[in-house]
Image (spheres, rainbow, N blue to C red):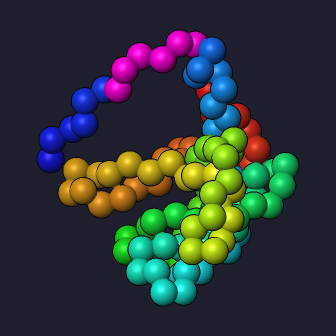
Amino acid sequence: KALEPIKHNINFDDFSKIDIRIATITAAEKVEKADKLLKLTLDTGLDIRTVVSGIALNFKPEDIIGKQVCLLANLEPRKLRGIESQGMILMTEDADGQLVFVSPSTIAINGATVR
């Protein structure tokens, strides 16, 4: 699979605005009438928040509970299928094109900043 080109440079001030935190998925369920969406409940160590993610074709809700993820925590909230999503989990793809969580290689503290 061809890789996407690297996007245009941003300055350090723009980068410093991004707040990526470690969070643990404490609950997950399919979003009604949406084949691709899961409603996730995340413990950020600072709060509990809801994130709607388009990963339902790749993951069963019961299989991802307890998984630590990287969360873009300061993304402006957005309603998806009537549910307010309060951030975005970071994902990538493996060599076969399957979605993979971007997560710490060892257990980290919820709320820890990714630098």
Residue 25 appears anywhere in the view: no
User: On the rendered structure, is 44 left or right of 67?
Assistant: right
Q: Is residue 78 above or below residue 31?
A: above
Q: Residue furthest bottom?
A: 33
Residue 71 in percent (x, y) is at 62, 48
The quadrant of the image that shows the C terminus is top right
Q: Is residue 11 within the magenta segment?
A: yes
**Image position of 82 (left or right of 8):** right
| Observer-nearest of 80 and 46 | 80
Please indicate whether residue 39 sits to the left or right of residue 50 in the image: left
| Residue at image coords 63%, 64% | 79
* Residue depicted at x 51% and y 48%: 90
* The magenta stretch spans residue 56: no
Magenta stretch prevailing secondary structure? loop
Q: Position of residue 11 (x, y in %)?
A: 53, 12
Q: Residue at x 36, y 59 (%)?
A: 99
Q: Which residues are magenta?
A: 7-12
Q: Is residue 5 left or right of residue 39?
A: left
Please state the horizontal and vertical placement of residue 82, each as a whole percent of the image: 63, 74
Residue 90 seen from this side: yes
Residue at (41% x, 16% y) in the render: 9
x, y percentage for residue 42? 70, 61
